[in-house]
Amino acid sequence: MAEPYSDNELPQARVTPGRRKRISVIWIIPILAAVVALGIAINRIMKEGPTITIEFREAQGIEAGKTFIKYKDVNIGQVSKIELSSDFSRVKVTAKITKDAEDLMTEDARFWVVEPRISMSGVSGLSTLLSGNYIGFAEGRSKKSGRSYVGLEVAPIVSGQPGREFLLTAAALGSFGVGSPVYFRRIAVGQVTSYELAPDGKAIQLKVFVNSPYEKYVNPETRFWNASGIDMSVGANGVDIRTESLVALLAGGVAFETPSYAKVDGPAAAGTGFTLYRDQATAMKQPEAIARKFVLYFDESLRGLSVEAPVLMLGLPAGEVTAVGLEVDLKADRPRGRVEIVAYPDRLITRLGGAGAADAADMARGKAVREAYFNRLVEQQGLRAQLRSGNLLTGERYVALDFFPDVPEAVIDWNLAEPVMPTIPSALPELEAKLGSIMTKLDSLPYKAIGENFNTTLETVNELLARWDKDLTPELKGALVDMRAAMTKADRLLDNANTNITGPDAPTQQALKDALDEVSRAARSFRDLTDYLERHPEALIRGKDEEKN
């Protein structure tokens, strides 16, 4: 049996401290390189901007590593990768944005491809002909950042410019297009930025951008109109042709102005909607404070009468035509023309002057006064509506309110919503009836018999001329020969008279010269006698003294 051991008898381990190892100098270089690389990596990460993706319909002119993203012509990023989307319908462009432009990457930022474009409103992107296409950028207004975007197919017309955008509603697009100019007093102050069909499909909505500082001239009462093409009018002063500019003539344009009668409360806010009128005259037309509708019935053709045709009273504008149609009464023999007009008494009241100014104020204030005065004109003065021709070339007609004393009596029922105004037939149907009667008489003439008689007369005249040529021509020839001989004799007689009387050596001339010499000598002797008597008046009594030697 083994003997037991105690703990004191067991061998004890002794710890011997080892030798301390030193780091080799060769490791310093890799460590320093690692530190430098880490610093560079951290610095790059801190300076590197975000990575964004932009989807385009196509990537024409975009190249990875070459195409830049520019904002205000400054590079803020570069395309790093181009690939197709997951459904292969679009192109996905990945780009690196610089750190200083990171705050610009909001969720409503816009991107588009800038390339050369030529349109009627101008030329853009010419710099890309040498440098190549690039991606344009426009900052948004949101405060939230974004990293995925859908690129615009068409570059925005305005980007980053101060001003305001307004919405216009038009019945049709006309010649407008993106980039069409906007004018204020014939100065280009903006342009059309976009257009689209209204949600109900009954109108066109255009967005126009007015540059600063001209946006302050747009207020809620401002009127916009189509300034495209040529506005031509013919008046007493000749032909007046107006157009905003050659660009508006070719590419279309919009003009705006505030009417002088409008009350201006301040500039309009961005996004305010306006109506786009077809022309300046319609846009600047002052709304009528007093308007009264009437119905006119005519038993004649309404050809040439159209909506907005003028209603004139004594040649002055008094309203306009609002509808032209027919009215059928089953009890009547035939339908009749129905014309609706709206009368504007203010247009005539404002023209009253002198003694009528006070009456004008009463008529402007009181409806009953106007109706009573109109009744007197109709019942006592024979005021009637009549169709008249406004232009013989185009056939346009208008409604004239004039006075006809010898017309049947008429009364206006003012209780009707649209009172019926009495009418009188125009002079044109009567003229047409007379012309028709004349044409009927002309058609009834026996043209064939007249032609036969005329041919017979011509044959008789031809026979008479032939007879004269046969019987009278020889005699006329003889008479002409005798006349020629007589003229020859007369010429000879005149030549002899010239030789004997008027010639320089003619006897008559010599005799006349001698006679004139004798008269001259006699006159000289008489002058000597008078001179002698003046010196010796006594010679009349005593006689002339004999000269002594």
Image: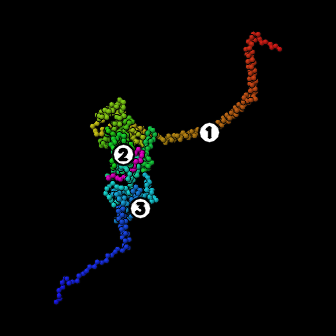
Q: Which mark is residue 216?
A: 2
Residue visible at 32% across and 43% down in the picture: 265
Residue 413 lies, in percent from the top left, at 29, 36
Residue visible at 66% across and 35% down in the picture: 480
Disc 2 to disc 3, how far (Cα)?
40 Å
Closer to the camera in the image, 409 or 262: 262
Q: Could you say whether the residue bearing mark 2 is in a helix, strand or loop? A: helix
Residue visible at 38% across and 47% down in the picture: 213
Q: Is residue 549 in view from this perspective?
A: yes
Q: Give neighbour class at mark 1: few <14, some 14-19, many 20+ (Cα, 10 Å).
A: few
The type of residue carrying mark 2 is: Lys
Q: Could you say whether the residue bearing mark 3 is in a helix, strand or loop? A: loop
Q: Nearer the viewer, mark 2 or mark 1?
A: 2
Quarter-wise, where is residue 468 in the image? top right
Q: Is residue 196 magenta?
A: yes
Quadrant of the rendering where the N terminus is positioned: bottom left
Q: Could you tell whether 251 is left or right of 87 in the image? A: right
The type of residue carrying mark 3 is: Thr
Tell which circle, 2 or 1, labels the residue nearer the N-terminal end: 2
Quadrant of the rendering where the C terminus is positioned: top right
In the picture shown, does residue 527 fall above or below 228? Answer: above
The type of residue carrying mark 1 is: Asp
Q: Could you say whether the residue bearing mark 1 is in a helix, strand or loop? A: helix
Q: How is the image coloured?
A: rainbow
Q: Which mark is residue 67?
A: 3
Tell which circle, 3 or 1, labels the residue nearer the N-terminal end: 3
* Mark 3 and mark 1 residues within 8 Å of each other at the beta carbon: no
Residue 266 lies, in percent from the top left, at 33, 44
Range drawn in magenta: 184-199
State the residue position of label 1.
469
